[in-house]
Image (tube, rainbow, N blue to C red):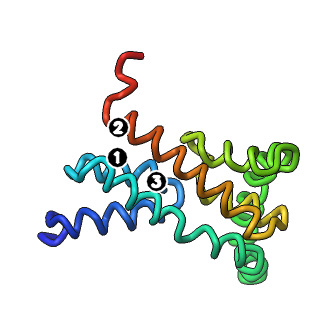
Amino acid sequence: MEFLSTFFGKVLMTFLTSMVPVLELRGAIIYGQGAGLDLWLTLIVSIVGNMIPVPFIILFIRKIFELMRRWSSRLDKLVTYFEKKADKHKRTVEKYKFWGLFILVAIPLPGTGAWTGALVAAMMGMRLKDALPAIFFGVVGAGIIVTLAAAGFFSFI
């Protein structure tokens, strides 16, 4: 556990945390800043880590869901749950395309983020070249918002 207290360990934990669904970039930035990492280093490491799973989700999640459905009824229910969550955001993304996906990812609230954006893009059959830029800029936007919030920028509110 001593490794986690080193500079490299803190950077690695920030990076790995940003790849975890639900925690994603939001949790990684809070961890990195709490661990004493530089503000901008934390932001960059979190953005890179948060983007790593995105192309894989877009390209493979439908096939993974198909396999999960065949594996067991419990996994089938889990897939149905994720599909319903994606459907909630689908209309907005269909209507506003790039900007809908960007906003879905950029607003740092529960149920939004890169994983959700990638899932919605995959469920809609969006091409990687269309979805990836919107998700990337959304991640950057969310990262800036969370970084400023964690640094106390919004403390006057």
Q: Position of residue 113 (x, y in %)?
A: 59, 51
Give the quadrant of the C terminus.
top left
**Image check: 86 left or right of 52?**
right
Q: Which residue is mark 1?
A: 30
Q: Name above or below for residue 45 compared with residue 71.
A: above
Type of residue at label 1? Ile
Which residue is drawn at the image coordinates 23% and 53% (left, top)? Answer: 37
Query: CB under 8 Å between callouts 3 and 1?
Result: no
Q: Secondary structure at mark 3?
A: helix
Q: Name above or below for residue 37 compared with residue 156.
A: below
> Between residues 11 and 41, which one lies in front from this camera angle?
41
Disc 1: CA contacts within 10 A as few (<14), some (14-19) or many (>=20): many
For marks 2 and 1, give the CA distance.
6 Å
Query: CB under 8 Å between callouts 2 and 1?
Result: yes
Type of residue at label 3? Leu
Q: Position of residue 13 (x, y in %)?
A: 31, 65
Which residue is drawn at the image coordinates 38% and 61% (left, top)? Answer: 45
Type of residue at label 2? Ala
For marks 3 and 2, give the CA distance.
12 Å
Q: Secondary structure at mark 2?
A: helix
Which residue is drawn at the image coordinates 38% and 65% (left, top)? Answer: 15
Q: Position of residue 140 (x, y in %)?
A: 52, 50
Q: Which residue is mark 3?
A: 25
Disc 2: CA contacts within 10 A as few (<14), some (14-19) or many (>=20): some
**Mark 3 or mark 2: whose residue is earlier in sequence:** 3
Q: Which disc, if any, is residue 150? A: 2
**Mark 3 or mark 1: whose residue is earlier in sequence:** 3
**Mark 2 or mark 1: whose residue is earlier in sequence:** 1
User: Would you identify the image quadrant in which residue 1 lies?
Assistant: bottom left
